[in-house]
Image: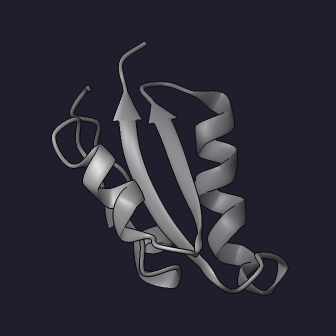
Amino acid sequence: MANISVDATAFAVFDMQKLSAESFDAGLAGAGDDLAVVFFRGLDCFNCEIARKATPAQPDAIPVGFTAMSTSIAN
């Protein structure tokens, strides 16, 4: 997985856990019965930028009772 810099705002808003290739399976298992939501982001990804800006701006639109995680992917 690529090492891509990202604005940490979404991490703070949703108490998001950063995943890597090594921690991905354990992160999903750690969600338990919660809905596991994984945000995949890529370098120069238009949709990733839109989500990065829009998601923290509307935290009430995101359902409660989920575990948020994020990881980067290589293009």
Residue 15 is situated, as x and y percent measured from the top left of the image, at: 42, 81
| Residue 51 at x, y percent in the picture | 67, 51
Name the residue located 71 percent from the left edge and 82 percent from the top edge: 59
On the question of residue 8 being in view, the answer is no
Residue 36 falls in image quadrant: bottom right
> Residue placed farthest to the top in the image?
75
Which residue is depicted at the point 70% across and 75% down?
57
Task: Identify the image quadrant of the C terminus.
Answer: top left
Compared with 25, 73 (above or below) is above
Q: Nearer the viewer, residue 53 or 35?
A: 35
Colour mapping used in the image: one colour
Q: Is residue 5 rendered to the left or right of residue 72? A: left
Residue 34 at x, y percent in the picture? 58, 75
Q: Position of residue 4 (x, y in %)?
A: 29, 36
What is the quadrant of the N terminus in the image? top left
Q: Is residue 15 left or right of residue 23?
A: right
Residue 13: tell me if it is visible.
yes
Q: Residue at the spot x=21%, y=49% of the render?
A: 23
Considering every residue shown, the one lying at the far left of the view is: 22
Asked which quadrant contains residue 20, the reply is top left
The structure residue drawn at horizontal position 44% and vertical position 70%, both measured from the top left corner, is: 31
Observer-nearest of 17 and 12? 17
41 lies above or below 34:
above
